[in-house]
Amino acid sequence: MIFSQCIDRKKISYGGDWGFVDFIHRCPTYNFTFGGDTSRNWNALADPIDIMQAPSEVLTLKKTIDDKIRDFAGELFFSKVFFNSVEIIYADRLKAFVDSGRQDVTLKYCKAKYFFYYEFKPDTIATYHIGIALDKNGNIINKFNFPSKDYYKSIDTTFTYCKLLEIARKVQQNIDPIEEISLEYNAKTKRFYWLLSQEVVDQKEGTNYFNQVYIDAFDLTKATTSRASVRVIY
């Protein structure tokens, strides 16, 4: 998809929630990815490490997760899912993290052993975050934040960001200026939707209200608007 210049590309934000806070928050972890740092001198504050330096079971676990996502959500959904990286908790290196300057590191919130990061990408710009937590035995211990193949409706590939803006402005005339556009998922309806949020221009201390428009990602003719709020404290 060719990006249109009707909105600043920086305003197209990621959607979804990795969900890592509930499983590896403030834990001593190293992040591994394809094409990461090949140095053998791991630094707790450094860039992701090449995945070939991760424990041998990691690639096997990745394949297992890939298969489970495919089996659960179907091939059509999985074809747009991409592996990002994996974080692994190293409890025995807690002191090394503290000594490196990570004074907030603790084992108190470490419910998982591995945390895999995936992205669902309907095009080359929009991204929906998917996080998969595993215990030390390789069992998935969190819920999937995406639909099963019985409910998944493919994203309407005819969409453009200009088209989304046009739809939003018809539904809610007071939607400009746009703060961001993101792809989100409603676990109750089991549908993906585009969320367009208005920017709060004249912020004041306390509660600030702004408009939002929800557009069904499968059926762009379905759109609703709502009013949201954010609290500002100076």
Image (tube, helix red, strand yellow):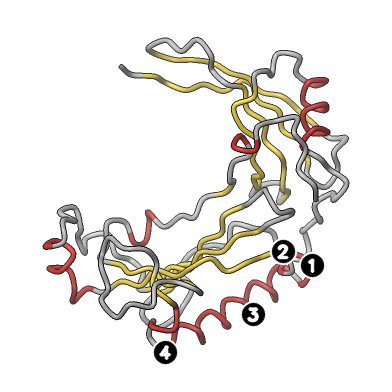
Q: Answer yes or no: do the residues labelled 3 and 1 have beta carbons within 8 Å?
A: no
Give the residue number, with chain letter if any, for mark 3. 67
In terms of depth relative to the viewer, which is nearer, 107 or 81? 81
Q: Name the residue under label 2.
A: 80
Circles 2 and 1: CB atoms closer than 8 Å? yes
- Distance from disc 3 to disc 1, alpha carbons, whole Å, reads 13 Å
Q: What x and y, as percent, mark residue 90?
A: 26, 74
Which three-letter amino acid code belongs to the residue tagged 4?
Answer: Ser
Task: Kindly identify the amino acid type of the residue bearing the numbered disc 1.
Answer: Leu
Marks 2, 1: nearer the viewer? 2
Vertical side of 181 occupied by 191: above or below? below
Residue type at tag 2: Lys
Task: Give the mark nearest the N terminus, 4 or 1.
Answer: 4
- Upstream in the sequence, badge 2 or badge 3? 3
Residue at screen point 77% across, 58% down: 151
Residue 72 vs 2, above or below: the answer is below
Q: Residue 150 location, x and y as percent? A: 78, 64
Residue behind mark 4? 56
Residue occupying image coordinates x 34% and y 61%: 24
Above or below, comparing residue 21 to residue 165 in the picture: below
Dot 3 or dot 1: first in sequence order is: 3
| Residue behind mark 1 | 76
